[in-house]
Image: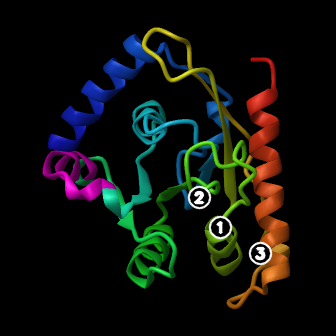
Amino acid sequence: MVRKIVHSLLYLFCIIVFRVKKVGEKNVPKQGAYIMCANHVSNWDPPILVAATKRKLYVMAKAELFKNNFIKWIAKECCVFPVKRGKMDMEAMKFSLKILKEGEILMLFPEGTRKGMEKNGKAQNGAAFMALRTGVPVIPVGIQGEMKPFHKVKLNYGKPLDFTKYQTNKPEKELLDKVSKEIMDNIIMLTKEEI
Protein backbone atom coordinates (compact mmCIF):
# COMPACT_ATOMS: atom_id res chain seq x y z
CA MET A 1 0.00 0.00 0.00
CA VAL A 2 2.77 2.45 0.97
CA ARG A 3 4.62 1.65 -2.26
CA LYS A 4 1.49 2.39 -4.34
CA ILE A 5 0.99 5.76 -2.62
CA VAL A 6 4.66 6.73 -3.01
CA HIS A 7 4.62 5.57 -6.64
CA SER A 8 1.45 7.56 -7.43
CA LEU A 9 2.82 10.74 -5.83
CA LEU A 10 6.13 10.29 -7.62
CA TYR A 11 4.33 9.77 -10.94
CA LEU A 12 2.29 12.97 -10.52
CA PHE A 13 5.42 14.90 -9.53
CA CYS A 14 7.36 13.66 -12.58
CA ILE A 15 4.52 14.33 -15.02
CA ILE A 16 3.97 17.87 -13.71
CA VAL A 17 7.57 18.93 -13.02
CA PHE A 18 9.45 17.09 -15.78
CA ARG A 19 6.58 16.81 -18.31
CA VAL A 20 7.59 13.21 -19.01
CA LYS A 21 6.74 11.86 -22.46
CA LYS A 22 6.96 8.11 -23.08
CA VAL A 23 7.68 6.52 -26.47
CA GLY A 24 7.79 2.81 -27.29
CA GLU A 25 6.34 1.65 -23.97
CA LYS A 26 4.87 -1.32 -25.84
CA ASN A 27 8.46 -2.63 -25.92
CA VAL A 28 8.15 -3.36 -22.18
CA PRO A 29 6.31 -6.71 -22.00
CA LYS A 30 3.64 -7.06 -19.31
CA GLN A 31 5.22 -10.22 -17.92
CA GLY A 32 8.58 -11.95 -17.69
CA ALA A 33 12.08 -11.16 -16.53
CA TYR A 34 13.98 -8.34 -18.24
CA ILE A 35 17.01 -6.16 -17.61
CA MET A 36 16.27 -2.51 -18.36
CA CYS A 37 19.29 -0.32 -19.16
CA ALA A 38 19.31 3.45 -19.63
CA ASN A 39 21.75 6.31 -19.99
CA HIS A 40 22.46 8.18 -16.77
CA VAL A 41 21.69 11.91 -17.09
CA SER A 42 21.00 12.86 -13.47
CA ASN A 43 20.00 11.59 -10.03
CA TRP A 44 16.38 11.97 -11.20
CA ASP A 45 16.74 9.12 -13.72
CA PRO A 46 15.81 6.25 -11.33
CA PRO A 47 12.69 7.90 -9.82
CA ILE A 48 11.47 9.08 -13.23
CA LEU A 49 11.83 5.58 -14.72
CA VAL A 50 10.24 3.94 -11.67
CA ALA A 51 7.32 6.40 -11.80
CA ALA A 52 6.81 6.31 -15.57
CA THR A 53 7.14 2.57 -16.23
CA LYS A 54 3.92 0.65 -15.60
CA ARG A 55 5.70 -2.48 -14.41
CA LYS A 56 7.56 -2.63 -11.11
CA LEU A 57 11.28 -1.94 -11.49
CA TYR A 58 13.99 -3.06 -9.09
CA VAL A 59 16.71 -0.43 -9.33
CA MET A 60 20.35 -0.91 -8.41
CA ALA A 61 21.79 2.32 -6.95
CA LYS A 62 25.08 3.35 -5.33
CA ALA A 63 25.29 2.47 -1.64
CA GLU A 64 26.23 6.06 -0.69
CA LEU A 65 22.62 7.16 -1.28
CA PHE A 66 21.42 4.95 1.57
CA LYS A 67 23.25 6.93 4.28
CA ASN A 68 20.27 9.30 4.47
CA ASN A 69 17.45 7.59 6.41
CA PHE A 70 14.63 9.31 4.51
CA ILE A 71 16.13 8.41 1.12
CA LYS A 72 16.75 4.90 2.43
CA TRP A 73 13.05 4.57 3.35
CA ILE A 74 11.84 5.96 0.01
CA ALA A 75 14.29 3.69 -1.83
CA LYS A 76 13.01 0.61 -0.03
CA GLU A 77 9.39 1.47 -0.84
CA CYS A 78 10.33 2.00 -4.52
CA CYS A 79 12.33 -1.25 -4.80
CA VAL A 80 15.73 0.47 -4.97
CA PHE A 81 18.59 -1.55 -3.48
CA PRO A 82 22.25 -0.68 -2.83
CA VAL A 83 25.39 -1.77 -4.64
CA LYS A 84 28.94 -1.08 -3.48
CA ARG A 85 30.79 0.42 -6.41
CA GLY A 86 34.40 -0.31 -7.36
CA LYS A 87 34.30 -3.97 -6.36
CA MET A 88 32.30 -7.15 -6.90
CA ASP A 89 29.31 -6.81 -4.56
CA MET A 90 28.17 -10.41 -4.16
CA GLU A 91 25.12 -9.50 -2.06
CA ALA A 92 23.81 -7.12 -4.76
CA MET A 93 24.65 -9.71 -7.42
CA LYS A 94 22.71 -12.49 -5.66
CA PHE A 95 19.72 -10.20 -5.09
CA SER A 96 19.75 -9.19 -8.78
CA LEU A 97 19.74 -12.82 -9.88
CA LYS A 98 16.85 -13.53 -7.47
CA ILE A 99 14.84 -10.64 -8.98
CA LEU A 100 15.30 -12.02 -12.50
CA LYS A 101 14.52 -15.58 -11.40
CA GLU A 102 11.21 -14.30 -10.01
CA GLY A 103 10.29 -12.83 -13.41
CA GLU A 104 10.74 -9.15 -12.49
CA ILE A 105 12.56 -6.24 -14.19
CA LEU A 106 16.04 -5.25 -13.02
CA MET A 107 16.99 -1.62 -13.80
CA LEU A 108 20.69 -0.84 -14.36
CA PHE A 109 22.71 2.12 -15.62
CA PRO A 110 25.67 0.72 -17.62
CA GLU A 111 27.54 4.06 -17.49
CA GLY A 112 27.96 3.48 -13.76
CA THR A 113 27.93 7.20 -13.04
CA ARG A 114 26.09 10.29 -14.24
CA LYS A 115 27.01 11.32 -17.80
CA GLY A 116 29.66 8.60 -17.87
CA MET A 117 29.92 8.52 -21.66
CA GLU A 118 30.36 12.30 -21.83
CA LYS A 119 33.31 11.88 -19.47
CA ASN A 120 34.78 9.34 -21.94
CA GLY A 121 33.99 6.56 -19.50
CA LYS A 122 33.64 2.92 -20.47
CA ALA A 123 30.34 1.09 -20.01
CA GLN A 124 30.35 -1.18 -16.96
CA ASN A 125 29.91 -4.91 -17.62
CA GLY A 126 27.29 -5.62 -14.92
CA ALA A 127 24.29 -5.61 -17.27
CA ALA A 128 26.12 -7.74 -19.84
CA PHE A 129 27.13 -10.22 -17.12
CA MET A 130 23.52 -10.54 -15.92
CA ALA A 131 22.20 -10.96 -19.47
CA LEU A 132 24.80 -13.60 -20.38
CA ARG A 133 24.48 -15.47 -17.10
CA THR A 134 20.66 -15.63 -17.13
CA GLY A 135 19.67 -15.39 -20.80
CA VAL A 136 17.29 -12.56 -19.86
CA PRO A 137 16.66 -9.96 -22.64
CA VAL A 138 17.81 -6.35 -22.22
CA ILE A 139 15.44 -3.42 -22.80
CA PRO A 140 17.45 -0.31 -23.77
CA VAL A 141 16.03 3.09 -22.80
CA GLY A 142 17.18 6.47 -24.08
CA ILE A 143 16.55 9.41 -21.73
CA GLN A 144 16.36 12.74 -23.56
CA GLY A 145 16.06 16.29 -22.24
CA GLU A 146 17.32 18.41 -19.40
CA MET A 147 16.46 17.39 -15.86
CA LYS A 148 15.24 20.85 -14.94
CA PRO A 149 11.77 21.81 -13.68
CA PHE A 150 9.25 22.23 -16.51
CA HIS A 151 11.69 21.12 -19.23
CA LYS A 152 10.32 18.15 -21.16
CA VAL A 153 11.95 14.78 -20.51
CA LYS A 154 11.46 11.95 -23.01
CA LEU A 155 11.82 8.24 -22.33
CA ASN A 156 12.39 6.19 -25.48
CA TYR A 157 11.98 2.46 -24.79
CA GLY A 158 13.72 0.25 -27.38
CA LYS A 159 12.97 -3.31 -28.44
CA PRO A 160 14.40 -6.03 -26.16
CA LEU A 161 17.87 -7.27 -27.11
CA ASP A 162 18.37 -11.04 -27.09
CA PHE A 163 21.83 -12.36 -26.15
CA THR A 164 20.87 -16.01 -25.55
CA LYS A 165 23.23 -17.17 -28.34
CA TYR A 166 26.12 -16.07 -26.09
CA GLN A 167 24.64 -17.38 -22.81
CA THR A 168 27.24 -18.78 -20.40
CA ASN A 169 27.79 -19.04 -16.64
CA LYS A 170 31.33 -17.65 -16.90
CA PRO A 171 31.47 -15.03 -19.68
CA GLU A 172 34.98 -13.92 -20.65
CA LYS A 173 35.95 -10.24 -20.62
CA GLU A 174 36.04 -9.97 -24.42
CA LEU A 175 32.44 -11.18 -24.66
CA LEU A 176 31.35 -8.95 -21.76
CA ASP A 177 32.90 -5.92 -23.47
CA LYS A 178 31.21 -6.80 -26.77
CA VAL A 179 27.74 -7.18 -25.23
CA SER A 180 28.19 -4.06 -23.06
CA LYS A 181 29.07 -2.06 -26.18
CA GLU A 182 26.01 -3.36 -28.05
CA ILE A 183 23.75 -2.42 -25.12
CA MET A 184 25.30 1.05 -24.86
CA ASP A 185 25.19 1.61 -28.65
CA ASN A 186 21.43 0.89 -28.61
CA ILE A 187 20.90 3.27 -25.69
CA ILE A 188 22.87 6.04 -27.42
CA MET A 189 20.85 5.52 -30.61
CA LEU A 190 17.61 5.91 -28.61
CA THR A 191 18.86 9.17 -27.09
CA LYS A 192 19.34 10.63 -30.56
CA GLU A 193 16.06 9.57 -32.19
CA GLU A 194 13.61 12.37 -32.99
CA ILE A 195 10.50 11.56 -30.95
Q: Is residue 161 visible?
A: yes
Q: Is residue 1 visible?
A: no
Residue at which label 3 appears: 176
Amino acid type, residue under disc 1 in the picture: Val
Can you give x and y, in whole percent of width and height, for residue 4 in the image? 23, 37
Single out the mark in the foreground, 2 or 3.
3
Query: Is 42 within the magenta?
Result: no
Which SS class for mark 3? helix
At 60% from the left and 46% from the top, the residue drawn is 29
Mark 1 or 3, which is nearer the eye?
Answer: 3
In the foreground, 9 or 63: 63
Check if residue 71 falls in the magenta segment.
yes
Mark 1 vs mark 3: which is more N-terminal? Answer: 1
Residue 195 horizontal side relative to residue 76, left or right: right
Q: Which residue is labeled 1 in the image?
A: 136
Q: Is residue 17 above or below residue 70?
A: above
**Label of residue 34 in the image:** 2
Marks 2 and 1: CB-CB under 8 Å? yes
Question: Left or right of 145: which side holds 76?
Answer: left
- Disc 3 residue type? Leu
Tell me which amino acid carries mark 2. Tyr
SS for dot 2: strand
Per the model, the C-alpha gap separating discs 2 and 3 is: 18 Å
Q: Position of residue 133 (x, y in %)?
A: 66, 80
Task: Answer with left or right where residue 27 lies relative to residue 60.
Answer: right
Mark 1 surroundings within 10 Å by alpha-carbon count, few (fewer than 14), some (14 through 19), many (20 or more): many
